[in-house]
Image (cartoon, rainbow, N blue to C red):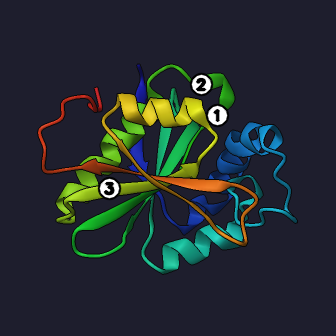
Amino acid sequence: MSSKIRTCTREDSGVLTETIRISFRDVAERFGLTPESAPRHPSNCSEDWIRKDLDRGVTYFMIEHEGSPIGCVALEKADSDVCYLERLAVLPGQRGCGFGKALVAHVMENARLLGAHRVDIGIIADHAELKNWYQRIGFIEGESRVFPHLPFRVTFMSYDLDKDCPKITSG
């Protein structure tokens, strides 16, 4: 796999926005999410959204394959022990090739460098395939909650960085 992962800058806002919007379009269609019903869903991502994330310390990583951007992920330090994995996105034509797993492994390495002991993520509770994918790479399912501003339940999942779990490798 001729791919590399790099840290993004403000100049990457446009390509990040496009990658995220395209990657989450099928999820929005599947669950009937619209800009009106779920304005903060990644399928509605904007460059302003990315720039505001970067300004508040969220780090974005882009994976490029043969020189073209094909996916990205965001890492946010929530507190001294916890980081959030956000907006994991791989373009539809590139899925199933290990790029998502490589991005998650990269986030885990960076979360450890930040001193975190756990990485958390929130996903659409009814997105069974995604939940199963995260479980296969070592995430543990936690509680599900309803938020008044969202048209779906959110399931929280976590990955314990302190346990020796070889399921995620960047290779």
Marks 1 and 2 close (CB-CB < 8 Å): yes
Rendering quarter of residue 49: bottom right
> Which of 4 and 155 lies nearest the eye of the viewer?
155
Quadrant where the C terminus is found in the figure: top left
Q: Residues within 10 Å of mark 3 (few under 14, many from 20)?
A: many
Quadrant where the N terminus is found in the figure: top left
Mark 3 or 2: in front is 3
List the residue tagged with mark 2: 94
Q: How far apart, in angstroms, are the residues tagged by discs 1 and 2?
A: 5 Å
Q: Secondary structure at mark 3?
A: strand
Q: Earlier in the sequence, mark 1 or mark 3?
A: 1
Q: How far apart, in angstroms, are the residues tagged by discs 3 and 2?
A: 25 Å
Q: Residues within 10 Å of mark 2 (few under 14, many from 20)?
A: some
> Which of 90 and 68 lies nearest the eye of the viewer?
90
List the residue tagged with mark 3: 119
Say what amino acid the circle numbered 3 marks. Answer: Val
In the image, residue 33 lies at what x, y percent? 81, 52
The dot on residue 91 is 1
